[in-house]
Image (tube, rainbow, N blue to C red):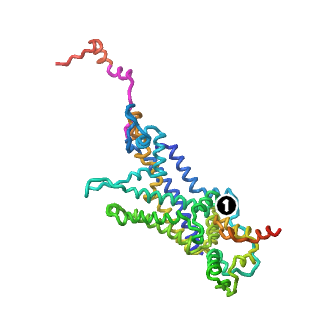
Amino acid sequence: MIGGAVFGVVIPYVAIAVFIVGVIYKIIGWANSAVPLKIPTTCGQQYTLPFLRRNIYDRFDCPQTMWETVGRMFFEIFFFRSLFRNTRFYYAPQMKYKDARWLWLFGIAFHYSLLLVLIDHLRFFMNPVPWFSSKLTDGLSLTGVFVPTLYLPGLLIVVALALLWARRLFFGKERTISLPSDHFVLILLLAITISGNLMRYFYKVDLEGVKELILCLSTFNVARAVSIADTIGPVLYIHLTLVSILLAYFPFSKLMHSAGVFFSPTRNMPNDNRVHIHINPWNPEVKGITYEQYYEMYKDQLDEIAENGYKVKPEV
Amino acid sequence: MYSTKYVIAAIIIFLAIVTSPVWYDMASGEPIHPKLAKPTGAHCVENTEWMKAHHMLLLKDWRTMHVREGKVLYTSQTYGDVYNASIEECFKCHRSETNFCEKCHDYMGAKIECFECHTYPELVEEYNK
């Protein structure tokens, strides 16, 4: 009774609350930070004299207008364009850049798998199941291989995470710059995806009960949720508790790059220093005066200079 | 706060996405649990709780037993009864596919593969009409 209530009701609710409040707190914190300088990264030809031509790449790499910047953000968020520029410089044997875009490949494989897995998970959260969720699940499943069908993004996500973690473990430079938090989120995500796959394919739980529990939680029917929580097998609670840990940890972790990408000034600012002045919000307020006020202040001297025909003689 | 209107819009979109199941479930007004047709027999092949989670594996094992190994009888691990290893054995008690299998599978968004080849009581009834 206590176990079901704690792992099935209390921990998920607390985790979701921490997640929502934490993410909004972080976003507001970032929105309150000043951007003193215009610091867009520029990888293309800036808008300039008409005989210097700009092609389409220059327009997205060195945006001048708002819509060019929106385009750059779009490609950044949906295609990780700046990761696609990932190269390494080698001093030995000869000075040379090497392609390291497999990082982009692993990253995009992971993120899109995660999106598809989340959309598939809507069938546990929504009643009736939304049509796009079931269509997508059917379309991306391999039938006839195993019972149940193999959901490909669910398997790909484990592979992509394993590769991303292997990169941090086996490459010297990456291992040197990896912090415990980097390893922690990767291990946590691996544990979540592996436990989810094990639950789907091998250690079955009563899905009807699982959905009933989640629907009770989402409609705040707590009493019924507590009574159902006890009837479901422990494998679900391994998965659910790991997800709760991830959600509660999310706002304080590097995973906040999901919101941070929208706030990165090197990406979201147009490079239009030559067109618009960027005011540093730290600048102290300067109170100007009109010429009339200035004239009032220095009336005598100015009149004297005017009388002398604007010729000022140095005092000897 | 800088760029206030964009930040507020972003927060609202974030909240809408995260809390969407709550609004969806409240708006749809569907019952939290589907009403399934009551089977006629005293008990299922195995323990009901086990069957809820593992029926697809049992059916797959029956397929392998029957089609590949030629064993047509299955002895229940829980009750010791002997059953034909056939989906027709299910329909002796579960008289309805649309009110039993399909209802729960629709509720879960899980696709049934059995009836791409097999018949089910409603289909037979319709054919014999």
Q: Amino acid at mark 1?
A: Pro
Q: Residue furthest right?
A: B129
Does residue B31 appear in the picture of this structure?
yes
Q: Residue furthest bottom?
A: B80
Horizontal and vertical percent position of residue A121 = 58, 62
Horizontal and vertical percent position of residue A307 = 29, 12
Q: Is residue A77 above or below residue A17?
A: above
Q: Residue at x 44, y 45 (%)?
A: A268
Q: Quadrant of the C terminus of chain A?
A: top left
- In the image, the segment drawn in magenta is A282-298
Instruction: Please rate how many residues cluster around mark 1, counting C-alpha atoms within 10 Å: few if below 14, some from 14 to 19, many from 20.
Output: many
Horizontal and vertical percent position of residue A183 = 40, 65
Q: Is residue A266 above or below residue B77?
A: above
Residue on which the image places disc 1:
A128
Instruction: Using residue B98 as the reference point, say whether residue A225 is left or right of it.
Output: left
Q: Quadrant of the N terminus of chain A?
A: bottom right
